[in-house]
Image: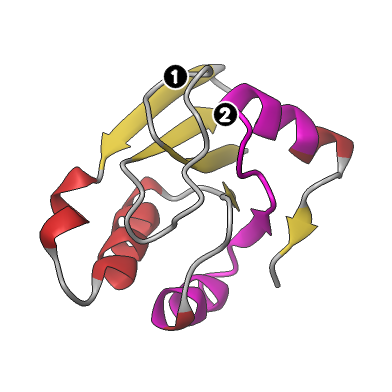
Amino acid sequence: MKIAFTAKGIDWDAQIDPRFGRTDYIVVYDEEADTLTNTDNREVEGIAHGAGPQTAQKLFDLAPDVLITGNGPGGNAAAALQKAKLKIFTGAGGMTVKEAFEAYKKGSLQDFS
């Protein structure tokens, strides 16, 4: 299973970014391969509209099974992500990527769907 996180950095100690569309990075943990990779998303910072759908497209390209974020995606991005059958969990704001992964495993994050 591949789990994506919105993050302000690129490793397990990075803080979860509460924003979806304007997250700095998307960090992906592949449980099967036991690898952690990241995608830089900072180019959406200057975009006035459409950051959420652009970030959603990046997420589609990464093909995770689960997304863990702080507050959750906004309107257009949320609709696109839910059609993709991606499981979305929120409530990880203030955690590190590692803490959010552990919270997910314990079932203590909120199901966004």
Looking at the figure, which quarter contains the N terminus?
top right
Callout 2: few (<14), some (14-19), or many (20+) C-alpha neighbours within 10 Å? many
Residue 11: mark in rendering: 1
Residue 68 horizontal/vertical position (percent): 60, 47
Residue 31 seen in render: no
Residue 35 horizontal/vertical position (percent): 49, 18
Which residue appears at 56% of the width and 63% of the height?
Answer: 72
Using residue 96 as the reference point, say whether residue 44 is left or right of it. left
Q: Which span is picked out in magenta?
A: 76-103
Q: Secondary structure at mark 1?
A: loop
Using residue 42 as the reference point, say whether residue 38 is left or right of it. right
Q: Amino acid at mark 1?
A: Asp
Looking at the figure, which quarter contains the C terminus?
bottom right
Residue 36 inside the magenta-drawn segment:
no
Using residue 23 as the reference point, say whether residue 29 is left or right of it. right
What residue would you read off at disc 2? 97
- Residue 94, placed above or below residue 53: above
Residue 83 horizontal/vertical position (percent): 53, 78
Which residue appears at 25% of the width and 46% of the height?
Answer: 41
